[in-house]
Amino acid sequence: MKANNGPPKVRLRDIEPLQDYYRDRDGNQYSVARLLDDTKELPVFDVPLAALSLSSTPWDGDNMVWLAYHLKKCMDADLSHPILLDWNGDVADGRHRILKSIALGKRTIKARRMTWRPTPDKKAEA
């Protein structure tokens, strides 16, 4: 018989990194996996965290389980991987790394920046 070690754990949804999509200013969607693959040869540079636009709402959701899911992703974020900025300088990938860097009191973060606008995987509805 299995010993009872207390109440059950709250279960977070599984992380599906290849299912992430980036939505640009115009509402077009891009596969983050494709963007990362297309930009892996771009140069990496240090960008000041204070220079990034931090005013947007990064994710949808409105409960504590949702928040815990993203908090865990922030805690587990690998700061050795650069974030990705789009052609406008907006964050296309790396919000959890940015939040972790801010929480740790860092001033800069490693980044790559796209210099072109790729074809979206899904165009915004007019």
Image (tube, helix red, strand yellow):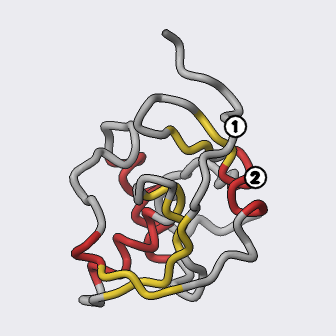
Find residue 38 and report its horizontal and vertical position in percent. 76, 60
Camera-side residue: 123 or 55? 123
Tell me the crowding category of disc 2: few under 14, some 14 to 19, or many 20 or more residues within 10 angstroms, Cα based: few
Name the residue beneath numbered marker 2.
34
Find residue 57 and report its horizontal and vertical position in percent. 30, 45
Name the residue beneath numbered marker 1.
119
Please give the label number shown on residue 39: none
**Mark 2 or mark 1, which is nearer the start of the sequence?**
2
Find residue 69 and report its horizontal and vertical position in percent. 47, 56
- Mark 1 vs mark 2: in front: 1
**Which quadrant of the structure image shows residue 30?**
top right
Q: The disc labelled 2 sits on which kind of residue?
A: Arg
Q: Is residue 124 left or right of residue 109?
A: right
Taking the spot 70% from the left edge, 66% from the top edge, the residue there is 39
Disc 1 on helix, strand or loop? loop
- Residue furthest out toward the front: 115
Q: Is residue 15 left or right of residue 37?
A: left
Disc 2 on helix, strand or loop? helix
> Up-down: is 34 above or below 47?
above
> Up-down: is 48 above or below 12?
below
